[in-house]
Image: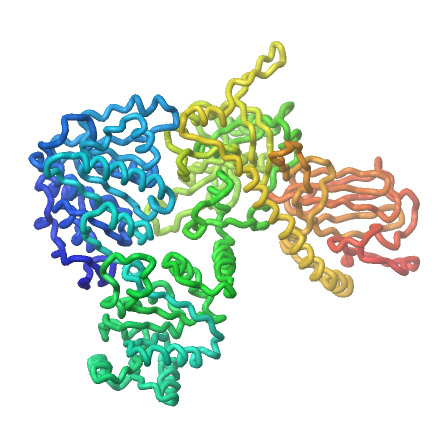
Amino acid sequence: FQSFKSVGKEKNFVFLSKKIEPSSVLETAPLFDGLKKELVWNKFSGPTFTQSYCWPPIAWGCDVVAISHQGNDPLLYIPPVLTLLQMESDYQALPNMSGPLALMLCPGWKKAQLVFDLLKTYRKGCRHLHPMLIILGQNKEAASQVEIQGREVVVTTPYNLLRLLEHNTGFLCRLCHLVLDEIEVLFSETTEQVFTILDCYKKATAQAQGGLPHQIIAVGTQWNKHITPLIKEFMDDPYIVMTVIEEAAIFGNVQQVVQPCMNSNRIAELLKILDFTQRTLQKVLVFTDSVSEAEMIHKALKSNSVVSLRKHKDSKCNAKCVLERWRRMHSSGTPAVLVLTDDCLQSLGIRDATCVIHFSFPSPGVFGQRLQSISDNFCTGIKDSAVDQEHTNAKSVILLTENSSCHAPGILHYLKHAEAEIPEELDLTARVLESEENEKSSRPLCAYLKTFGICRNRTECPDRHQINLSLDMAQNITGEMIETPERVTILPLLILHATNYFGRIVKKQKDQYTVLAEEMNDYFKISGHRISVNTVEKSVFYGLREGVSCHRVQVVETPAKDEENFNKVTIKYIDEGRTSQVNSDQLLHLPAKFQSLPPQAVEIVVCRVKPIDNEVEWNPKVTDHINHKIKGKLHHAKVVHTLGRTVWVDPMVGVTSLPTVKMWINEYNIRSEILSTGLGTDNPEHVRGIQKLCRQIAVLDHAQSLEHFTKEDTAGLQEASSPQDTSIQENLAESCNSSVTLPSSKPSIISTTKEAEDSTVHQQKSCHPQIKWLQDKMTVTLKVQILRAADSKCEFSREKVAFSAYSEGKLYVADLELYQSVIAEKSSCVIKDTEAVILLVKEKKGVWCKLLKNKNVHVSLDFEHWEESEDERRFTVG
């Protein structure tokens, strides 16, 4: 083991199984001269701290395991491997067959593409280097068409290599250098495949004759338990380089102990732990994050006859004095506990402690610094798991209290990674997951969850994996857009990837957007109508003219005035889904008549298909193929689910119209097209995953309704007794917690089970507007408080009035059952800027004692305009 001061981001720690003199200067690094020039030409600023320790043993041809925060950077191994390949004399004894000298195994096609691009960049500084990227589909003929003659370096993935080996069993016969890139991902997701490849390589090297070089290089960011058999069974005394203290602690077999206790009982728990360590003469450090706690611990230990020293920023003794006393006492057989705050650790420079006790719960960053104090006692050899505990020289004890949740997620993930025993009664996993999701509540819904029905890495994923009603249901697809869920017409306009698009749902008869687009084009043809906007506001709708076409756009981002391109704004085409940057002076004033139609762009997800090989992203070949095939063309699809403005469809079929015979011809099925590329496979769990996600809506909606009505029971009474008008915006926001049925029975959320693909219509998630009412003997007036109502409908019957309209992207619905009868034919509705005024003509003259048969918390008397007559005695609010 060695520890050196860092020159980079990785602080001052390096763990080595064998001594290495670092090459920290490019000029003296063990690299080919032409390669050094190419690195300089490409403005390479290294070598970094980790590279300075990894390059020498790799360039010597030795087996290497490197774990680092930059362990996913291919430049950790590419330069020294390319240097080795320039030594042609080392490979003269190889058999005269086709096959690579170096094989770089990556966890997925995206990383493989990155490695391949770097090889193409740096081969210019090397002689006769021809790298090759191999990504095969599941089509059997693909492997037979691979020609590797003269290709010294091959980059691929485990699944693709195994497909190739099925066809070409001699592929590894010339292989001298095997690189395992992102080893922790390879071993966690493709364990069986990687060990199969290692077995094949081992057999190939056993059959080789002469003193040919054979090398395995494994690099990554985390230790993995499968690295132990890799080292023992396939490597020859490798150099182990680790610059992440937490990962070195796992390799070094540090025992991680989680001790639950109440915050008020930490001292008693500490004394129990120290009773054991005192008997075994361990060097113990007790860490805390405050001076007051350090003093409290020190006094408590002294009062319980435990020899104790303390060091914090207010201590009178300097670090050197405390350290000498602590070590002298241990040498004399009197073990003393050193209590210290985190800010004193660096000045003390302790590396030889045997036990650290985390009295205050550490943050992830502080945790690593504390572990550094026991690094001299990390085990340096590979141990069998059966006797691991016998070789435990260092221990880390965490006191976990009810106040530890602040930093618990990061530490818990590490403890699980370290395979520490966590008491079952703590139920930390569920708590931590809940805590993490709460922190992500304002993030977008995870794209992987929507696209594939599952997110395989929820811990690292920055996005949300639970329903947030205010975000996911803020803008629903209107019932008019999906008239018949079993067949809708879709026009994809923006292809994000093979199964995810933005586009429009086109109505079969008279499409509203087609009419709107024609009217906008005609309007903006007249130069006098093209009025530029002086002040651009975020979230506001504007017009944009591109050639002969006009678009409705929304500003989503405006730059700060001190930015270089301060006149550039980011816009979203609300009827297409794409975003772009334009000059602010290109935006035109958009008349209100062109804003009444809600945004038409919807997100479309094709179900039940995913990338092969457990990839998380579609290969660009598939996306390009689908983009060319479907963009701007009409498709028929069956809607199986909707959420907000996202539509899941299965199937989605390209169609051609034959107007003469009034028929549509199905040309292709998108899912089948993807499968035919060999790069996609079946995903039967997709729809079930979406249904499971959306089941949260009912639970959340019920909880919100309970909360809403609890608050409104008293709010309604206060409003009646104290007639103070609140703003329309506040009223609308409050009313959005309730769920009501649309006047028309058009669906918003449609769900199809796998067993029976029958469409089930759910209630439209909508808001109830605030309504004030007043009357005279002949009529009743309802004032529906709604800003800039669009697409409004008002239907009258003898004992009922149903109102619906959109305002600022939200649907508002009021379905009112009247206390007495009205004359439907004479009743009317007028839309104004801040309200809709409904006039109901009474069937019988007289005063109503109330408006509705049943109480409605959103309906109240208009006290400001009420003129009470002598007849009006008793009346209720709604």
Q: Report x, y in % for residue 424.
A: 50, 63
Q: Is residue 531 visible?
A: no
Q: Is residue 362 left or right of residue 539?
A: left
Q: Report x, y in % for residue 452.
A: 49, 39
Q: Is residue 553 left or right of residue 209?
A: right
Residue under the point 47% across and 65% down: 423
Q: Report x, y in % for residue 420.
A: 39, 62
**Along the line of sight, the residue nearer the viewer: 253 or 353:** 253
| 29, above or below 432, in the image | above
Total marks shown come to: 0
Extreme residue in the left direction: 89
Q: Tell me where residue 416 sits by quadrant.
A: bottom left
Q: Tell me where residue 59 sits by quadrant.
A: top left
**Along the line of sight, the residue nearer the viewer: 780 or 197:** 197
Quadrant position of the C terminus in the picture: bottom right
| 509, above or below 681, in the image | above
**Along the line of sight, the residue nearer the viewer: 503 or 666:** 666
Q: Report x, y in % for residue 400.
A: 44, 70
Extreme residue in the top direction: 660
Q: Is residue 694 left or right of residue 394?
A: right
Residue under the point 36% across and 81% down: 294
Q: Is residue 772 visible?
A: yes
Residue under the point 18% across and 48% down: 236
Q: Is residue 87 left or right of residue 831?
A: left
**Along the line of sight, the residue nearer the viewer: 256 or 73:** 256
Q: What colouring style does the render use?
A: rainbow
Quadrant position of the N terminus in the picture: bottom left
